């Protein structure tokens, strides 16, 4: 059994290492990702750390950069972080927000011209999430109004008043699409776990700056969606794809999303201070963390996903899955007092330090494949961003700093 002194030492070391790593991550983006010619940020940095200056620029990447530097500025009021957040905000407002039809464009070229104007609700949610964080960092009222306006547009076009939940995607003028997929690996279905998770995340952050009654109702509705439809109470994992009536269209398991949802659902319930949902979410968080343990390898890392019908596990170890595992297991420890969960969080961090950190150039590699080799994927791109790993650092640093304030068993 760990003594209190031992736990305190482990936590102190953990916080110190993550403070240093957060600085390293953000330093990479400050010095490698700026588009000095056309503004904003380079759309791609390849696995060899080479800029691809004419790569398209994605809404999700830019929103996640805005969130990361805004959140980092709130933790550590560095003027450099504020300048980066301002840069990201200005680019999003000028190039990604669709000021004619509403919503945000999915992709622009390196000069800022729209190359894919579809309205993917996932991207819209991340923009709301980032603008809300930026307002908390800067008190920029225009950013707050953009976030609220985008929320109203999301509700108007995507909310399903009949069955609940949110439809996945629309055309540039909000017309129906035949291909709703977020990426080529996804199923072409009208409702997905992934989009609902990040709509919940966005609405939670928006509520912090705009505690609106309808917004609170929509957050409760999303919590109900997760409880009734998305989380499978039989196996503790989330269902990934649905039709418009919430009929299941997938049996695959995403360990990274499961552990991420375990703490984001509780965060949403606590933000709106809803006792019933807080109690439910606390129990859910620990159970989901427990079920995610089946996706742990002997080296401490979380595997990517399981294809249940084939009983096959994709034993890749992606950067974002490890980042979310660090937070999710730490959260389970806080809730349960079971020191094994703290150990799991620390073991994942040890894996990251030894296998995913680019100690020469900075940032985290995309991941390791099933043979343990580095994957030949972007260092920065449409999906590779500073959000998951910087958030893991910020979240755990903050929780260690607040130790004892929320959980009396400490």
Image (cartoon, rainbow, N blue to C red):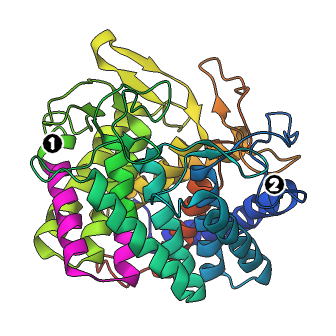
Point 14% across, 40% down: residue: 233
The part of the image, by quadrant, that contains residue 16 is: bottom right
Image quarter of the N terminus: bottom left
Q: Residue at x 51, y 30 (%)?
A: 298
Residue carrying label 1: 229
Q: Is residue 119 above or below residue 246?
A: below
Residue 246, horizontal then vertical, whole percent: 15, 36
- Residue that protrudes farthest toward the top in the picture: 310
Residue 249 colored in magenta in the image: no
Percent coordinates x, y for residue 71 in the rendering: 58, 73
Which SS type dominates the magenta stretch? helix
Q: Residues within 10 Å of mark 1 (few under 14, many from 20)?
A: some
Relative to 353, is 178 on the left or the right? left
Find residue 33 and name its label: 2
Task: Note whether 235 is above or below 282 in the view shown.
Answer: above
Q: Nearer the viewer, residue 164 or 312?
A: 164
Q: Nearer the viewer, residue 84 or 405?
A: 84
Magenta region: 203-227
Q: Secondary structure at mark 1?
A: helix
The answer to whether 400 appears left or right of 203 in the picture is: right
């Amino acid at each position: 059994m760990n003594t209190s002194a031992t736990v305190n030492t482990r936590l102190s070391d953990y916080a110190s290492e993550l403070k240093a790593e957060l600085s390293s991550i953000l330093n990479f983006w400050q010095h490698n990702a700026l588009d000095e010619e056309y503004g904003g940020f380079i759309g791609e940095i390849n696995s060899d750390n080479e800029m691809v200056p004419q790569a398209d620029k994605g809404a999700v990447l830019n929103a996640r950069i805005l969130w990361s530097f805004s959140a980092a500025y709130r933790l550590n009021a560095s003027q450099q972080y504020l300048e980066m957040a301002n840069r990201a905000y200005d680019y999003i407002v000028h190039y990604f927000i669709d000021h004619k039809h509403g919503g945000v464009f999915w992709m622009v070229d390196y000069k800022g011209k729209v190359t894919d104007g579809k309205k993917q609700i996932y991207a819209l949610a991340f923009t709301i999430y980032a603008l809300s964080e930026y307002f908390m960092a800067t008190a920029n009222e225009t950013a707050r109004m953009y976030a609220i306006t985008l929320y109203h547009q999301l509700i108007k076009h995507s909310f399903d008043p009949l069955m609940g939940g949110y439809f996945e995607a629309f055309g540039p003028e909000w017309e129906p699409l035949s291909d709703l997929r977020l990426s080529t690996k996804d199923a072409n279905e009208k409702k997905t776990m992934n989009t609902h998770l990040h709509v919940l995340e966005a609405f939670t952050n928006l509520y912090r700056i705009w505690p609106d009654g309808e917004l609170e109702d929509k957050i409760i509705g999303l919590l109900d969606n997760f409880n009734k439809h998305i989380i499978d109470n039989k196996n503790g994992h989330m269902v990934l794809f649905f039709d418009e009536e919430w009929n299941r269209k997938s049996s695959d398991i995403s360990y990274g999303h499961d552990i991420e949802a375990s703490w984001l659902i509780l965060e949403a319930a606590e933000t709106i201070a809803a006792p019933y949902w807080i109690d439910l979410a606390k129990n859910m968080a620990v159970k989901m963390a427990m079920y995610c343990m089946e996706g742990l390898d002997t080296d401490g890392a979380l595997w990517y996903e399981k294809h249940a019908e084939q009983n096959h596990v994709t034993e890749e170890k992606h950067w974002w899955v490890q980042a979310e595992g660090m937070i999710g297991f730490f959260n389970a420890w806080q809730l349960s007092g079971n020191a094994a969960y703290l150990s799991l969080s620390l073991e994942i961090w040890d894996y990251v330090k030894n296998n995913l950190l680019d100690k020469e150039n900075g940032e985290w590699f995309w991941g390791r494949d099933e043979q343990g080799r580095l994957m030949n994927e972007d260092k920065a791109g449409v999906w590779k961003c500073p959000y998951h790993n910087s958030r893991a650092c910020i979240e755990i640093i903050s929780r260690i700093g607040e130790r004892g304030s929320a959980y009396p068993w400490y």
